[in-house]
Image (spheres, rainbow, N blue to C red):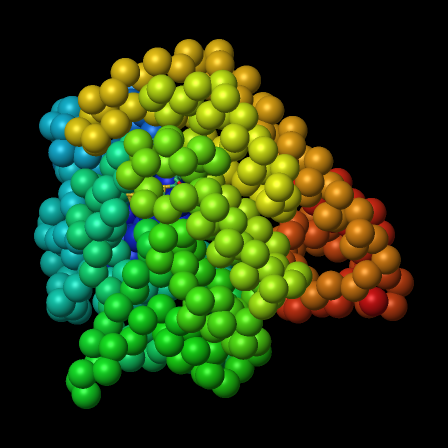
Amino acid sequence: MPMKYYLAVYGCQMNISDAERAAAVLEQIGYKKTLNMNEADLILVTMCSIRQSAVDRIHGLVDKFEIIKKEREQTLPAGRQVQTILTGCVLKRDKKIFVDGFDYVLDIKDIKRIPQLLGAKTKIKNQTDYLDITPKYENKFSANVPIMTGCNNFCAYCVVPYVRGREISRPAKEIVLEIKKLINPTSPRLRGAKEIWLLGQNVNSYSNVLKNNRIVKFPKLLEMVNSIPGNFWIRFTSSHPKDFSDELINAMATCEKVKPYLNLPIQSGDDKILRAMKRFYTVEGYKNKIKKLRKSVPDIALSTDIIVGFPGETKTQFNNTVKLFKEIEYDLGYISKYSQRAGTAAAKLKDDVSTEEKKRREKVLTDVLKQTALEHNKKLVGTTTTVLINEPKNDFWLGKDEHYRTIKVYPNKTASQIKIGQFVKAKITSVTPFTLTAEVI
Ligand code: SAH
Ligand code: SF4
Ligand code: F3S
């Protein structure tokens, strides 16, 4: 019986990508994946520390492990036991806390050490960087490609620079080579990816010096990826508004594979709060960038990230965010209640907005968002869109269109051959704020 591993993945796309790398290492030493935690020989957790609630979830898991380990002790052969590994984004102080709850707490950059920790005899290929490990891609047609790791921005509320370290950009050549392999349907390594996500905490500050001393910045990288022959979509995340340049707008407008969707986190619609957050742009500056972008890419779909209840945020300051939401008319939004993180600059400020008030602010923004998204979507009824099919459901298929809108695609009588990973043209028949219904044409 092969040993089985179970992955518990928390956090952003970067953590999903890292978990796929850890999975590849485990497969190399003969482990097979299971979707049932209770039958795993190894449970590997990639954790997120962005909010305390994410950390609390890991405490919940640790309690579960104790029960699982006790139960499995009865059935496993002598000498064999369930092992647990914690990796991903773990704060230093949490490492100390979790060392008792896990068999191993491991820096993500050290996942190559897993075989050695588990006592495996098979040696895995010696890569210099953990990003060189070829992931075991979960999705059959959408691939995450990290282009950089870390963050230099130290926004006052955020732990990422502490858990991920400073920014390091991967060589542009390596990224292009990796994508060429990913989109090649005959490659043994993969299977013809249709969607490539370029990942980084702040992709806009990507920078790589080539051998001839030319510098490749993010807009140039987009052009390089765009010129790879093949039928695939390019998306990227995350973008910091301070580094969102005219060159990038231009690249988005001219690169036909770069799809018209952008997440540009503003975090607050109030200049004083932005200063306290150490975001280094103003609301006016942000709005001007959006204006320029909409001029160059008129059909761009926009999303943002917001933190409500940052220390000292008054009702008036919050209302500035509401005003901004109404002005920009976002299509999607990721709204978080401020969570104090030890060690960050904002931890020195009093977390003085009550949980109740944070919840209220979150709801107010969600309601505005629902309205603006619905208004945008209503205009789409009767138009056609291209959908990348992602998941079969009972009587329809789920996918995303070029604008990253979630689409329920219903087959019509003549076009029943819908497959996962296929681009299909569909006509939009009805809409809600965040889901559109369409019929294949
Ligand atoms: N690098 C990305 C963000 C990564 S974190 C960027 O700069 O856009 C994802 C989101 O989590 C952030 O945009 C922010 O809205 C939210 N977030 C980060 N720290 C937080 C905290 N301490 N409390 C609540 N939300 C937080
Ligand atoms: Fe965190 Fe993003 Fe700010 Fe970096 S840019 S510190 S990842 S919010
Ligand atoms: Fe969380 Fe790490 Fe991503 S802290 S948001 S998983 S970079």
Picture coordinates of residue 42 (x, y %)?
27, 41
* Left or right of residue 395, residue 216 in this image: left
Where, quadrant-wise, is the C terminus in this rendering? bottom right
Left or right of 197? Residue 430 is right
Above-or-below relation of 34 to 196? above
Apparent side of residue 374 relative to residue 233 in the rendered image (left or right): right
Find ligand 2 in the image and state its quadrant: top left
Would residue 176 be visible to someone looking at this image?
Answer: yes
Residue 254: image location, x then y, percent: 54, 77
For residue 70, side relative to residue 307 (left or right) = left
The residue positioned farthest toward the right in the image shown: 413
x, y percentage for residue 196? 47, 66
Q: Nearer the viewer, residue 96 or 264?
A: 264
The residue shown at (17%, 29%) is 343
User: Foreground: 192 or 145?
Assistant: 145
Number of numbered markers: 0
Look at 74% across and 48% down and name the residue there.
377
For image coordinates 51% across by 54% down, the residue present is 288
- At x 45%, y 83%, the residue is 228
Q: List the single residue furthest toward the front.
A: 284
The quarter of the picture where residue 28 lies is bottom left
Q: Position of residue 248 (x, y in %)?
A: 44, 67
Above or below, 294 against 348 in this view is below
